[in-house]
Image (cartoon, coloured by chain):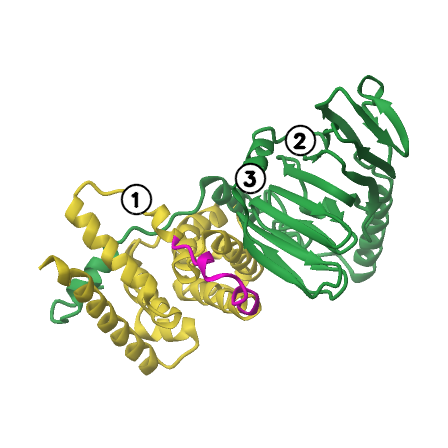
Chain colours: A yellow, B green
Amino acid sequence: MSRKDNPLTPDMLERIRARDTEALNLFFETYFSRAYGYVCRLVRDPNEAEDITQVAFMKIHRAVHTLDPDRDPTSWVFAVVSNTVRDYWRSKRYKQSRLNKSLDKTVVSDRLTAEDDQHARDAARILARALEELSEKLRAVVLLRDYEDLSYAEVAKVLGIAEAAARKRHSRALGELREAIKRAEQPKK
Amino acid sequence: MTDTNNPDSELQARIREIPIPLPDPAYRERNRKLFTGRIPYGQDSIRSFEPAPRGPLWLGLGIAAAAAVLLVFMFTTPAPVWEVVKMETSGTVAINGTELDVLDLPAQIASDTDLETGDDGRLTVGIDRAVNLVLTTNSAVSLGVDRSLLGKPVLTAMVHHGTAIGTTGPNFSSSGLRIETDHARVLITGTTFSVLSNADTTCVCVLTGTVRVESKQTGEVQMVPPEYQLFVSREGTDIQLSPITAIQKARLEEVRKKSP
């Protein structure tokens, strides 16, 4: 869903602030799957992504009455989600680092939908793999900028960094993706 | 957002074509009900918008009265009862030290009951649609029911020796089951697992879900993910995580097929 297709009008956001059930449902439909996909791509573990997304939405639910009806809530939603991911990393990383490296199963690909064209499937898989191999900081910027269509200013706000840093990370991420694709495609030439 | 003058625009367009991981439909539906207020968010229950109170004194008395009623209700809620689900042997099982023939086993097991299986004994006990525990041969387990601080009944199972294989069902509540051995406390967050114990070591094997294990000696906590096993020694200093064996996996899969 692109920015211009966002159904959350100011009137709808007022209803969401008032915790109108139908409005909350629309809010949920607008953001939940997107948030889950973002988290899943960041932490690369669907089980952890489920917990993180649920906690993030619990926080969002608590604070939904603070929404500004005159502003698009997308960057706020992803800021809450990103902070929840950060909390997860701070609390889990120590224990995660003790597990065997074989736990690092790339399960994101299990949820990818099938495509009919073999060539497209290979190219998409190469790019998906390259995206997974980016560092979390760079991957987050790509997901927010290129999937969620946030501006650099909004990406910076979500991630708690300067706008210049957001631009730099995005540029570096795209560079690393191009290099990774080039390396992967070389044997076929 | 694509800028035709940007050399990265083609790459960004390809990135956007990568399918996004989708949430499991059941998980998504549950969260939709949580978010829209149809079911509460656990202990931090968040309900639909409530009207403002008429006055502070009235509100305080109202909250106190509601809390008192709730506490009385929680502490008087009848606790669930362990039941005998299946006995796969023609031998005997000892209950509180008394050997009983399979035909003489009671349907329900009272709280604070010691169960012990012999050389050819295999007993399955459970709570309806919540959890089943399979006690394999030469196992000893004490079953009971405790109360949490808020009065909620908590099923307990102390594995003295042998093997207890567990699998959970749709009515299972992770806060409602506590399993222990002499060396470890096991908190069930997943579905199918086994706990093996002897005088020196406890081993927790997980097939599906995740299990939290705490060493009683050192307090160290380790999460055991699916298809992994964790050994905890009596001293608590030797904690090892490794993949489960094929035999363990097969045993757990067999039990999982008969989940409540």
Residue closest to the eye, A14 or A55 = A55
- Check the image and report above or below for B98 versus A93: above
1 vs 3, front mark: 3
Q: Which mark is residue A113?
A: 1
Q: Residues within 10 Å of mark 2 (few under 14, many from 20)?
A: few
Which quadrant, please, contains the C terminus of chain B? top right
Please report the residue visible at 54 percent of the width from the left and 36 percent of the height from the top.
Answer: B250
Q: Which residue is mark 2?
A: B129
Q: Give the amino acid type for the residue marked by disc 3 in the picture.
A: Ile
Q: Give the amino acid type for the residue marked by disc 1 in the picture.
A: Thr
Which quadrant, please, contains the N terminus of chain B? bottom left
Q: Position of residue B196 (x, y in %)?
A: 69, 45
Q: Which mark is residue B247?
A: 3
Q: Are marks 2 and 1 in contact (CB under 8 Å)?
A: no
Q: Are marks 1 and 3 in contact (CB under 8 Å)?
A: no
In this view, the residue farthest toward the left is A189
Tell me where the magenta segment starts and ends, as one range.
A93-106
Instruction: Using the rendered image, report if marks 2 and 1 lie on a common chain.
Output: no
Q: Position of residue A78 (x, y in %)?
A: 43, 64
Please report the residue visible at 33 percent of the width from the left and 77 percent of the height from the top.
Answer: A166
Residue A144 in sight here:
yes
In this view, the residue farthest toward the front is B119
Q: Secondary structure at mark 1?
A: loop
2 vs 3, front mark: 3
Q: Give the amino acid type for the residue marked by disc 2 in the picture.
A: Arg
Residue closest to the eye, A188 or B177 = A188
Left or right, residue B125 beside residue A117: right
Instruction: Using the rendered image, report if marks 2 and 3 lie on a common chain.
Output: yes
